[in-house]
Image (cartoon, helix red, strand yellow):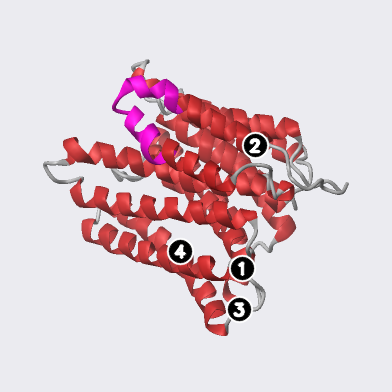
Amino acid sequence: MDKRLPVVFRLLLFTSMAAAFIFGFMDQYVNMNFERLHIFLFNLTSGGFTILFITGRRQAPGIKAGLFYALSILYAILAFMELYIPAAAAAVILAVIVESFRREKFQIFPAIFFKARYSTSEKFHDASLLCLVIALLLSAFVIVNDSWLRLFYFQKLTLDVFFLGFSFPVSLITMSIIFGILENNIPVNVIMFEHLAFWSVCAGVIVFFLFIIAESFSGEVFISTFLFVTVLLIFLVFFRYGREIQQKYFLVSAIYFLLFTAITGILYILIKNTGSYELHGRIILRMHAFYSLYGWNLTGMMVIIRWEDFPIALNTRKAIFFHWGVILILAPAAKFIPVLTLPAIAAYIIFLAVFFFSGNRVRTSM
């Protein structure tokens, strides 16, 4: 059976990923806030579909996956247009679709989180689906509360905060892939670390989200530093014990982006309440967003989407360096130097097209 993602779905994902990136720069030309379209099209539409694709054992996406893709775009548009009640209804339907995928692969209660016999890769996979369901339901509740119920108010608990809520499931599915390609014969202490890393990442991000809502400066600094150290240790383990396949090199690059994301996140927390925010904070925040979305998350999604095509016919090192140049330097700079916007968009689309549609070196047996 051919488990590669059909070309039509590659084109759809390519379109949503490209559109998300373009919307990230639209505020330079139109006096509107395109942040929701930018983030939701990337993390929810593209990221959510990728999670469902791997959950369906990389078989050709069916009606449910196609419905998720279309409905998530509608959700992004409704949220952008501030049509909140229809957006909340769409979020609930999306959550039901994701949970149906989850129930086909895992149990309703995530018992595997607490059982050592299950691999860390499986745990991260289940956590990714569960987190996406919770994020969708929570977003629906926040929408209804803000526009109708008004039961309580938190300045930080708004729909715009779901940059983190919809980004985290993509991070978890990438972690699932990373731990899934570790060597089989690894030391017992490394296996113990895997399970500890799972709880550190999941619990750490949940606590971090709570600290953001509570606006706890010291809490945010502590937990973000803790997560940085955790990711650094995961990187060292993966670099040492990851199987020497082409996917590993792209995932190593992804973890570098995640480390840059963590560093810029910590810097942003430290200076956001100081007088230097206007000078440096906005730059650091843009760097943080690009590194997270189009560095870490994008690499994980592309590896999943093209998994059955590896080894793919491109120069791995040149592709990674080109990606770094576009996302580490060119794209963040373009947010403040408009003349760089079109070159940044063009370079990103070229990278995306090459990775999505390049051939594979070894013909896959049908």
Asked if the residue under mark 2 is in contact with the one under mark 3, i.e. CB atoms within 8 Å, the reply is no
Mark in front: 4 vs 2: 2
What amino acid is found at the position of numbered circle 2 in the picture?
Phe
Secondary structure beneath disc 4? helix
Give the number of marks.
4
Q: CA distance from mark 4 to mark 2?
A: 29 Å
Q: Which residue is mark 1?
A: 182
| Residue at mark 1 to residue at mark 3: CA–CA distance | 8 Å
Residue labelled with disc 4:
201
Mark 2: secondary structure: helix
298 to 241, vertically: above or below = above
Residue sitting at the far left: 275
Tell me where residue 295 appears, x and y as whole percent.
47, 44
Q: Which residues are magenta?
A: 327-344
Q: Work out whether 161 lies above or below 247.
A: above
Which amino acid type is shown beneath numbered disc 4? Answer: Val
The residue that label 2 is drawn on is 356
Badge 3 marks a residue whose secondary structure is loop
Look at the image and tell me whether residue 155 can be seen.
yes
Q: Residues within 10 Å of mark 3 (few under 14, many from 20)?
A: few
> How far is mark 4 from mark 1, CA to CA?
18 Å
